Image: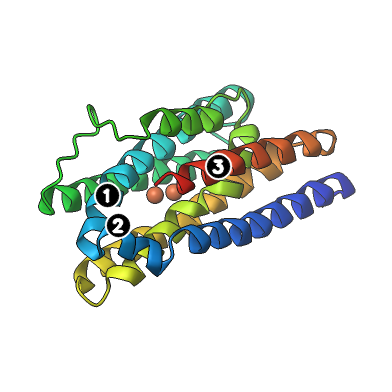
C-alpha cells in the first residue's frame, strides 16, 4: 500500500469507529427506558417507530446506494476492479428493501398501516431533508462518508435498542430486529471499500464535514422520534 493509500485507509477506519461510537451514544441517550415508557410502553413504541423506521430503511437505504452504483459505473471499473463494490451495493439494496418490508409488515400486524408509497409521518420533512443530505452528492465516496462510514449504524443501534426494550413481551419481534441489524456490517464494509478506492488525501477535510453535517441531521431526526 502506498503512503497516500495508507493515509486514506487510516482516515476511513478512524471515521467508521468514531461514528460507530457517536451513533451508539446518541441512540442510547435518546431512547432511554423512561422515554419509551412515556410513549406508552412496548406496543406503543413499536407502533410509533416501525413505520418511520420502515420509511428510513427504504429511502435512506436504497436511494444513496442506487446512486453510488451508477457513480461507480461512470467513474470506476464496474466490470473489473470495482466488481466487489457493485456486488456489495446490490446486496445493500436488496437488504434494505427486505428490512423495510419486515418493518412495514410488523407495523401492519400491530394495526398501523404502512404503505411506503404514501406514508408521511409527522416528521416527514425532516426525514426527507436527512435523506437528501445523504443522497445529493456527485461522487460515491461523498455519499459513503455521510452514510455507510458514519451515520448508517444508527439504524442497527435503533433496532437493537427497541428490541431490547420489547424483548420480554415480544421475543419473536426482538429476534427479527436483531436479524435486520446483523446485515448492517456488510453495508459499512462496502462504504469502506468505496472511500478507500475513490477518496484522495486532499479531500479528507471535505469528507469529515459531510459526515459531521449528516451526523447533525441524524441526531435531529432521532430527537424528534
Ligand atoms: Fe437496513
Ligand atoms: Fe444498511
Foreground of the two, 69 or 12: 12
The disc, 2 or 1, on the residue closer to the chain's N-terminal end is 2
Circle 1 is placed at which residue position?
48
The disc, 1 or 3, on the residue closer to the chain's N-terminal end is 1
The numbered disc on residue 39 is 2
Position of residue 99 measured from the top left corner of the image (x, y, whole percent): 31, 49
User: Which element carries disc 3, helix, strand or loop?
Assistant: helix
The numbered disc on residue 147 is 3
Position of residue 73 measured from the top left corner of the image (x, y, whole percent): 54, 26
C-alpha separation, residue under disc 2 versus residue under disc 1: 9 Å
Position of residue 65 measured from the top left corner of the image (x, y, whole percent): 47, 35
Within 10 Å of disc 2 (Cα), the crowding (few <14, some 14-19, many 20+) is: some
103 on left or right of 159: left
Residue sitting at x 48%, y 58%? 30
C-alpha separation, residue under disc 3 versus residue under disc 2: 29 Å
Residue sitting at x 43%, y 37%? 60
Report if residue 94 is visible in the image. no
Marks 3 and 2 close (CB-CB < 8 Å): no
User: Which element carries disc 1, helix, strand or loop?
Assistant: helix
112 on left or right of 25: left
Report if residue 136 is visible in the image. yes
Marks 2 and 1 close (CB-CB < 8 Å): yes
Amino acid at each position: 500500500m502506498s503512503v497516500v493509500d495508507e493515509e486514506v485507509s487510516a482516515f476511513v477506519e478512524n471515521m467508521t469507529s468514531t461514528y460507530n461510537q457517536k451513533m451508539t451514544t446518541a441512540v442510547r441517550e435518546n431512547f432511554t427506558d423512561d422515554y419509551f415508557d412515556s410513549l406508552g410502553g412496548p406496543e406503543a413504541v413499536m407502533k410509533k417507530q416501525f413505520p418511520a423506521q420502515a420509511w428510513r430503511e427504504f429511502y435512506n437505504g436504497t436511494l444513496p446506494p442506487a446512486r453510488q452504483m451508477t457513480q461507480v459505473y461512470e467513474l470506476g471499473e464496474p466490470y473489473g476492479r470495482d466488481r466487489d463494490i457493485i456486488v456489495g451495493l446490490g446486496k445493500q439494496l436488496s437488504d434494505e428493501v427486505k428490512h423495510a418490508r419486515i418493518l412495514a409488515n410488523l407495523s401492519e400486524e400491530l394495526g398501523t398501516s404502512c404503505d411506503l408509497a404514501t406514508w408521511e409521518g409527522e416528521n416527514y420533512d425532516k426525514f426527507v431533508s436527512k435523506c437528501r443530505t445523504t443522497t445529493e452528492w456527485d461522487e460515491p465516496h461523498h455519499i459513503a462518508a455521510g452514510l455507510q462510514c458514519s451515520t448508517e449504524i444508527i439504524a442497527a443501534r435503533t433496532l437493537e435498542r427497541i428490541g431490547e426494550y420489547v424483548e420480554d413481551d415480544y421475543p419473536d419481534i426482538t429476534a427479527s430486529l436483531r436479524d435486520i441489524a446483523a446485515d448492517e456490517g456488510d453495508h459499512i464494509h462496502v462504504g469502506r471499500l468505496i472511500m478507500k478506492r475513490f477518496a484522495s488525501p486532499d479531500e479528507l477535510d471535505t469528507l469529515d464535514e459531510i459526515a459531521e453535517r449528516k451526523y447533525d441531521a441524524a441526531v435531529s431526526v432521532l430527537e424528534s422520534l
